[in-house]
Image (cartoon, rainbow, N blue to C red):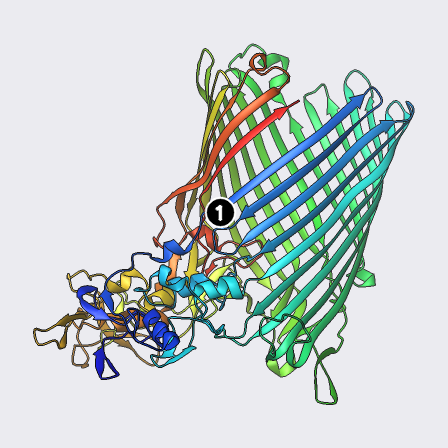
């Protein structure tokens, strides 16, 4: 309560970005943040000056902040052909708005390709593509100030109404935010208004890309061809990010320009010859030269911005930061393949490739990788022709070895330039120690499988077992800081992957024009880190970023979550201290792998007289994720689990009630954790205790309740295992319905098709209802970390296509 102009008001602690207020009660009136701004801005009595409102759930909750994104894709193509060639030209326009305010995407794609026979011996071909795109307001991900999801699910206050936040700027240009330092200090404390984030701090990026190829094919003999081709791919990507003056965080502006050009010049001899009545040979021999140049120019202001709303590197409070890098890489390759077939029944396929990479030491620059695959179509055997129920049968086995190089400039150490200190120029050793004795990474794989079809292809089975071993993994492993480096680049790891892949296909029903097809996919992979470099105990892949890490340790799967766990006694009971709180292990321990136990997909497809429909379901079982949202959302009282009831029926939070005299009182709630009372001795063994702290003869059940706040805060200070969630889910991935109108009804318009589709329609079985486990996946090695995850999107679309 505060006194303003002689009147006492109830007011939330707007300076705290947590949600530990009293239970909603329509009889309680309080001062919303917007009435304070209106009072300060208007400066005279009005209906909005210090207006109070009931303490109730917001009418426009967080979901009201999001918008329905709409994307339009239009394509037109022109094709033509004659007996000597063909061409195609097309233009595609994509224009869309995102699901967050002030977000949009524009992309234009031009394509042209064609081929021409100049004679029966010579043919030329070429393709050219140009793509220009622009994006405004790409959502920030992870634990960052400009990720609004962090403010909605981890830090914030639950009573806030999104409608009241839409006016995010005062008349003088300053921000209107609920998270004021104090009721009489409107400066933002920790959190910006989410609309300010989206409109004042929205990033922009542009990309121009041109790629294509041109070549000729020379027919030397009826069975021998030579093709020469030149591939070209270049793009310029420019991204601008900023934090506006008036924001909570340090203001800045940055530009990041990347220019990447890759060329590939190749030649290829192709052989296709029937050797005799029994054997047919297909073979190739060729070479390629790849050259890639990557240039990055990055500039960022330092010490804040000087002039508001002026985004230029020169608008820097101090000397700006500049990063200017150029990377070059080349790979020369020779390769060949041969495929030998016997009576359409026995096949032997072999490949051999040698690469010379500029990023490896001279002595180790060359690496050779071969492969051999054999298959036997046993259903072609004359002895099996009488078995009509067998439509097709094949067994196959293969072995392969593949090499891999590393990034440019990983061999020798060089000093890095840092921002100068006054007139002094500063250089320093890099954080990673390079290695001039690197070897190429190598992966050896073996697989066997079979493909079977029965009953005139009504039932099919495709099964594969594989085993891969990667050695000499190129990793930047952690080293002692006394070396002057944080990491050292080494051939540091050996890892194995073994698993199975199974696909079942079937047509359960065919009645007249009606047909029902089913496809079931199943995949299971077992992964193990077999060894690391001598003296290296672990390879850290990523961080939580607070109380958990993702690591690879010998004998465990690649991608193990590490953090503190609950303490358990010999009977599997959780151990609780005399204070009523969980004990946690003194050391970090493995809490589960981010890799799933298995994945599956089920597709049902239906067709009838021009109509078609399909339904796809995806399933993931097992795997773990560490959720920063769960940790901070519980800590700050944002998530509903921090305001529920425990197994005894007690309110987790203290309930604030108003007495008849207008004062407030607390009805004590709390949490009773299930477990036994104890402590750890010096050797890490569990010692049972009584409630008074004396040593007990045996396990004693905990009977001490703790406050809901203490229980929730311990999601950060207690065992990290509380925030490790199961990554299982079942998803209704896609539903699609379409109709192709018969050509006899459409005149000059041919293949007129109308279809609708919906993706990501529903999810079941997730461990935490607030988090989609799939949002923790990324395109790199860092998996299993969730923090401020963006919401999963449901997409509904409409397609119209035809030929003229």
Decide: is 390 above or below 328.
above
Rendered location of residue 148, percent (x, y) = 45, 62
Residue that appears at 71% across and 35% down = 90
- SS assignment at label 1: loop
> Residue 566: horizontal and vertical position, in percent?
33, 67
Residue at 81%, 47% (x, y): give it: 264
Q: Is 274 on the left-hand or right-hand side of 501?
A: right
On screen, residue 524 above or below 306: above
Q: Position of residue 140 (x, y in %)?
A: 52, 61
Residue 441 position, x and y percent, is 69, 56
- Residue identified by numbered label 1: 69
Q: Residues within 10 Å of mark 1 (few under 14, many from 20)?
A: some
Considering every residue shown, the one lying at the far bottom of the view is 423
Out of 671 and 637, give the one closest to the viewer.
637
Residue at the image point whose x is 74% and y is 42% from the top: 129
- Tell me if residue 325 comes above or below residue 599 in the rendering: below
Q: Is residue 721 visible?
A: no
């Amino acid at each position: 309560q505060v006194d303003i102009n002689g009147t006492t008001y109830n007011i939330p602690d707007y300076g705290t970005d947590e949600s530990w207020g009293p239970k909603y009660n329509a009889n309680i009136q309080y001062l919303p943040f917007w009435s304070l701004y209106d009072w300060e801005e208007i400066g005279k009595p009005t209906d909005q000056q210090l207006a109070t409102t009931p303490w109730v759930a917001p009418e426009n909750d967080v979901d009201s902040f999001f918008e329905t994104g709409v994307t339009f894709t239009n394509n037109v193509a022109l094709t033509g052909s004659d007996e000597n060639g063909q061409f195609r030209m097309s233009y595609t326009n994509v224009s869309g708005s995102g699901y967050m305010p002030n977000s949009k995407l524009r992309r234009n794609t031009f394509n042209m390709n064609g081929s021409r026979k100049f004679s029966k011996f010579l043919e030329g071909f070429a393709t050219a593509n140009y793509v220009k795109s622009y994006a405004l307001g790409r959502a920030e991900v992870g634990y960052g100030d400009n990720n609004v999801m962090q403010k909605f699910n981890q830090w914030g206050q639950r009573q806030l109404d999104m409608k009241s936040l839409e006016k995010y700027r005062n008349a003088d240009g300053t921000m209107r935010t609920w998270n004021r330092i104090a009721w009489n200090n409107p400066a933002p404390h920790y959190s910006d208004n989410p609309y300010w984030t989206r409109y004042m701090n929205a990033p922009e990026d542009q990309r121009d890309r041109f790629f294509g190829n041109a070549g000729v094919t020379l027919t030397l003999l009826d069975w021998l061809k030579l093709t020469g081709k030149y591939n070209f791919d270049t793009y310029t990507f420019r991204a601008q990010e900023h934090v506006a003056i008036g924001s909570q965080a340090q203001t800045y502006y940055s530009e990041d320009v990347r220019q990447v050009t890759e060329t590939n010049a190749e030649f290829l001899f192709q052989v296709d010859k029937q050797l005799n009545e029994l054997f047919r040979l297909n073979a190739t021999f060729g070479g390629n030269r790849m050259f890639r140049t990557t240039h990055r120019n990055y500039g960022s202001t330092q010490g804040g911005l000087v002039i508001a709303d002026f985004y230029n590197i020169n608008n820097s409070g101090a000397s700006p930061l500049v990063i200017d890098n150029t990377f070059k890489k080349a790979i020369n390759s020779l390769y060949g393949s041969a495929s030998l077939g016997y009576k359409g029944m026995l096949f032997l396929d072999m490949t051999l490739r040698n690469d010379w990479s500029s990023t490896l030491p001279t002595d180790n620059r060359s690496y050779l990788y071969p492969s051999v695959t054999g298959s036997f179509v046993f259903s072609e055997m004359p002895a099996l022709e009488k078995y009509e129920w067998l439509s097709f049968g094949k067994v196959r086995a293969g072995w392969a070895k593949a090499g891999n190089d590393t990034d440019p400039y990983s061999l020798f150490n060089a000093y890095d330039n840092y921002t100068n200190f006054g007139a002094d120029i500063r250089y320093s050793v890099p954080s990673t120690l390079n290695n001039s004795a690197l070897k190429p990474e190598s992966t050896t794989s073996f697989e066997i499988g079979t493909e079977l079809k029965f009953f005139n292809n009504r039932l099919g089975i495709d099964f594969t077992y594989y085993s891969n071993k990667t050695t000499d993994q190129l990793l930047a492993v952690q080293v002692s800081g006394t070396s002057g480096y944080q990491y050292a680049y080494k051939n540091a790891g050996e890892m194995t992957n073994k698993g199975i892949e199974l696909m079942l296909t079937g047509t359960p029903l065919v009645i007249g024009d009606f047909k029902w097809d089913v496809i079931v996919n199943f995949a299971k992979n077992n992964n193990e880190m077999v060894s690391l470099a001598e003296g290296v105990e672990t390879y850290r892949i990523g961080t939580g970023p607070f109380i958990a890490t993702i690591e690879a340790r010998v004998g465990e799967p690649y991608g193990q979550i590490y953090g503190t766990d609950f303490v358990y006694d010999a009977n599997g009971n959780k151990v609780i201290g005399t204070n009523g709180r969980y004990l946690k292990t003194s050391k970090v321990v493995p809490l589960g792998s981010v890799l799933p136990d298995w994945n599956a997909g089920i597709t049902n497809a239906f067709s009838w007289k021009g109509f078609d429909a399909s339904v796809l379901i995806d399933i993931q079982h097992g795997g773990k994720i560490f959720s920063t949202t769960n940790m901070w959302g519980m800590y700050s009282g944002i998530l509903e689990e921090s305001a529920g009831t425990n197994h005894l029926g007690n309110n987790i939070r203290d309930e604030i009630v108003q007495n008849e005299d207008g004062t407030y009182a607390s009805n004590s709630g709390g949490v009773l954790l299930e477990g036994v009372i104890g402590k750890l001795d010096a050797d890490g063994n569990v010692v049972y205790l009584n409630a008074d702290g004396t040593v007990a003869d045996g396990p004693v059940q905990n009977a001490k309740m703790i406050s809901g706040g203490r229980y929730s805060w311990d999601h950060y200070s207690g065992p990290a295992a509380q925030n490790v969630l199961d990554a299982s889910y079942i998803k209704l991935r896609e539903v699609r319905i379409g109709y192709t109108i018969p050509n006899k009804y459409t005149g000059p318009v041919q293949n007129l098709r109308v279809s609708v589709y919906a993706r990501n329609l529903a999810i079941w079985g997730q461990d935490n209802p607030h988090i989609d486990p799939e949002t923790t996946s990324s395109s790199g090695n860092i998996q299993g970390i969730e923090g401020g995850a963006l919401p999963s999107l449901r997409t509904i679309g409409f397609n119209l296509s035809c030929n003229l």
